[in-house]
Image: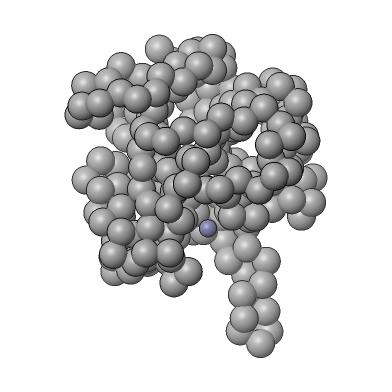
Amino acid sequence: MKVTLDVLWNGKTEFNESGSIGRNTCSISLLDLDGTKVMVDLGFPNLDRERLLSELASRNVTPEDIQLVLYTHLHPDHMGEPVLFPNALFVYHEAERAKGYLKKYRTMEVNGEYNVLPGGELDRGVAGPLRVLESPIRAIMTPGHTMGSMTILVDIEEETWALAGDAVLSEEDFRAMEPAHISMDKEMARKAMERIGTLADVIVPGHGPTFKV
Ligand SMILES: [Zn+2]
């Protein structure tokens, strides 16, 4: 299986003049697994639309080409606009308690870890050590920020990349082992960060530049 990973952009948090959190854009990635196009997170509805479409167009990818959208979690700054991707299956953990509107689209709720297979199928319910699995794209459970937070691991040559969503907000938070301040369960979130640190060589955090572990 041949996989490529293209981080369309790294998320960042912008602050208002008053110091409060302003616009909050998440990291968005495009994967290709033997020709199957997969996106991880979609950014902010409306605000990120033009940028997202132009980033895809510059890679000769149309929204219709996207077969899978893997959500790290369902906060608004990650959910984007499913309506833009008519052929995609939207995958998220059932603990995310998807808002009704997402269910208008083709969705799959998972309740465990899964592998992504060529053609866009998911191999779910696989028990046992992750490292023996065949697929170069795997989703692991990293709850804490939200109860259904998933991290997507991608093997690129000799390195494992973690598309962590807000399980790792930024390198700074990771170095301090300090979970996002908006975390449903901080202790779980800390354990999730530790797990990501043991599995990954490179981390694409939800809201910061990519960094090496
Ligand atoms: Zn979040």
Left or right placement of residue 21 versus residue 185 in this view: right
Q: Residue at x 44, y 48 (%)?
A: 149
Where is the N terminus found, in terms of image quarters?
top left
For residue 19, what is the image quadrant? Answer: bottom right
- Image coordinates for residue 97, horizontal then vertical, percent: 56, 48
Of 149 and 26, the residue lying toward us: 149
The answer to whether residue 190 shows anywhere in this view is yes
Q: Residue at x 79, y 45 (%)?
A: 50
- Image coordinates for residue 157, horizontal then vertical, percent: 33, 25
- Image coordinates for residue 105, horizontal then vertical, percent: 71, 31
Q: Residue at x 53, y 22 (%)?
A: 32
Of 38 and 88, the residue lying toward us: 88
Does residue 170 sit above or below 211 in this rendering?
below
For residue 104, what is the image quadrant? Answer: top right
Does residue 32 sit above or below 162 in this rendering?
above
What color scheme is it? one colour
Does residue 159 sit above or below 201 in this rendering?
above
